[in-house]
Image (tube, rainbow, N blue to C red):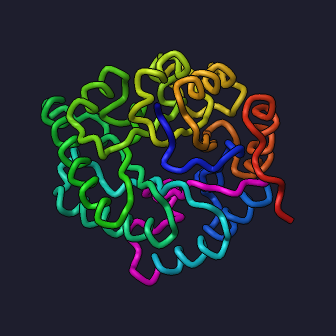
Amino acid sequence: MNTAVENPGAVELACSTICFRNSVLADALQRIRIQGFDAIDLGALKGLCEHVPLFGTAEEMREASRIVTESGLNVLSVNADPGSFNDGTPQLEILERIEALTMFCAEVGSPLLLLPSGAAERTDVSYEQQLEAVATGLNAAAAVGARYGVKIAVEAPHHYRLINTLPRVRQLLALLEPAVGLVYDISHVRAAGEDPARSYAEFAPQVVHIHLRDAETGNIRKVLGSGQIDFPAFHDASRQAGWTGRYVLELETHDSPFSSKDEEVADALLRLNHVFTTHAKAMK
């Protein structure tokens, strides 16, 4: 039976700081608390959401850790892009960044470090070679994480990366050590032309983290309610397959402005209220 790394009980919904990536870390955490969440994903994505400073100094990492700890929010994961094992970057260089990130995870109590499934497919190297490089790198990352008590998980499929379809997810999983978990983002599954609810059971034994966002075939960035995802069907399918953990809202869209992100998250909660167990009451 499939289960999350941590079972928070009745509360099901959490929030990624990527939803408020235009704010500095402290402000993003405050906006999340006002919405009523008690648990978060932290963004560490270069050029997109650097709430955890990927290439920061030790002092900057300590300051981020202090802000997160003082917020009182439970950290479910750090969602990071320290480099891709198929883009020509030396593996050792990426693993050094991963070690710094796992140390950060340990400091803030995050049980998971989420990593990408490669960069976009290159044309100068065979797909098979790139697949092998990604799998080898992720297995090495899992060994690094284990030293700090942090589990490594890969987000796959991902619409913009090497592993962008379910057949490719199957190929990657066949090469990964059992220690590497799977992040199941339903928007990327839908963007690949698949039904997240119908597909979930196959991957349930490997899933350790779930992201929620609406999508349509070929487009992961839809305001919740404007895409093709059947959220009640997915909730039912995941629970029936044994999922006992959180579902994390990651509402990073291109068809809504930063100025309305608070309203977008609040609207998403209203739309999901009849499906998911309500999140914590708003903090004043």
Instruction: Give the farthest residue toward the front.
Output: 1
Q: Position of residue 143 (x, y in %)?
A: 24, 57
Question: 244 left or right of 257?
Answer: left
Q: Position of residue 170 (x, y in %)?
A: 30, 25
Q: Quadrant of the C terminus?
A: bottom right
Q: Is residue 5 above or below residue 253?
A: below
Question: Residue at 61% across / 23% down in the picture?
Answer: 234
Q: Position of residue 138 (x, y in %)?
A: 26, 47
Question: Residue at 48% across / 48% down in the picture?
Answer: 5
* Depth order, front residue of 179/128: 179
Q: Which residues are magenta?
A: 36-60
Question: Residue at 44% across / 54% down in the picture?
Answer: 112
Q: Is residue 282 magenta?
A: no
Q: Position of residue 56 (x, y in %)?
A: 41, 74
Question: 258 left or right of 116?
Answer: right
* Depth order, front residue of 29/223: 29
In the rendered image, which quarter is residue 91 located in? bottom left
Q: Is residue 48 magenta?
A: yes
In the rendered image, which quarter is residue 175 located in? top left
Question: 135 left or right of 224?
Answer: left
